[in-house]
Image (spheres, rainbow, N blue to C red):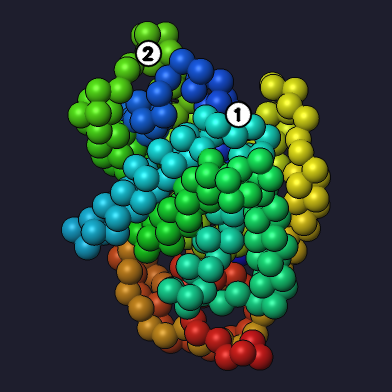
Amino acid sequence: MRWFNYRHTLDAIFAAILFGLSAPLSKLLLGSIDPIPLASLLYLGAGLGLGAALLWSGITGRSESTEAKLGREDIPWLLLATLTGGVLAPIFLLYGLRSTPAVTVSLLLNFEVVATALIAAWVFREFVGLRAWIAIGFITIGSILLTLEPTAVRGVSVSAILVLAACLMWGLDNNLTRLISLKDPQRIVAVKGLIAGGFSLLLALILRKPFPSAGYIVLGLLLGSMGYGISLALFVRALRNLGTSRTGALFGTAPFIGSGASFLLFREIPSLPFFIAFPLMAGGVFLLFCEQHAHEHVHDSITHDHAHRHDDGHHVHEHAEGHTSRLIHSHRHTHERIAHSHEHRPDIHHRHLHTFSS
């Protein structure tokens, strides 16, 4: 089980690094590309990049995947996640980023952790402990501080509100994607990227938004393939093994990475609210990262299909003779009912209800 936790913790961290760098780099491209065409390029880059990788695997004879395939029952959740996180979120973010310092926007992206955890707790009944609620409070206070703009009509930055709206959409996207996170992450992101990028492209054409030169188009696609494609594939893989709010906590390092990169790129001196919000948000992310959870719990019998191996404590079923069950593999299997106690997170095998005391 430890091997799985370390591996998927690294998945979430690398996803955070790639996504964190995407905000300041997107700010650079916004000087030459309108927000809606750029949103299209970012997600088309994600879809085309992972789609090409899957196609290459098929051509070279390496198409046999250890991952479970997407099914009809996954389509509604995939489409909703695509609309919220693939279409609305990047458009909100890029319009907000266009008029707000990149260092501020990068730190504001911490609100995605709050949105993800609140939706996970209130809608999907995922357990959130006292330490996590305190962390959510710290990050929320920091987010509010970053939206303040004394020179604005009502003292609030509209651009910052757009960034928070993007975080809310990504928080909903994260929870919807969790419902299909048992399936192949590369295929999820490839399909999601192509649909979202295609929709935004159509929207840009309908609204007659100007498109940049070929060089900037290539840069937008490359940024999308790394910051949204590979990053999202790693995020989905971590999501199903660490749970929504915990993966969100690890992914919460992305804003700090983005803030550091923004300062180096633009040499912007942040405002006073930034320096107050930074330690609050850093403390909140640290509390979420260090959260521990263990108690007696029951696993009801369930049959499903996903990638797994047999050293994680929850996959002890038998295979036909000759099957290399020590390797990661995917097939339909049944978990028998079991009750035990150990440290765990709300991953795919620990989404049980809790009493207040647990």
- Which callout, 1 or 2, points at the residue further toward the start of the chain? 1
Measuring 38% from the left and 60% from the top, which residue is drawn there? 176
Is residue 66 visible to the viewer in this orientation of the structure? no
| Image quadrant where one finds the C terminus | bottom right
Figure disc tally: 2
As drawn, the label of residue 24 is: 1
Measuring 42% from the left and 59% from the top, which residue is drawn there? 172
Under circle 2, the secondary element is loop
Taking 162 as reference, is 303 above or below it? Answer: below
Amino acid bearing label 2: Pro
Give the camera-side residue of 85 and 325: 85
Looking at the picture, how far across and down is residue 171, in whole percent? Answer: 48, 57
Q: Is residue 88 left or right of residue 168?
A: left
Classify 10 Å Cα crowding around label 2: few (below 14), some (14-19), many (20 and above). some
Taking 221 as reference, is 338 above or below it? Answer: below
Looking at the picture, how far across and down is residue 179, in whole percent? Answer: 37, 63
Is residue 318 visible to the viewer in this orientation of the structure? yes
Under circle 1, the secondary element is helix
Q: Indicate the quadrant where residue 313 lies.
A: bottom right
Amino acid bearing label 1: Pro
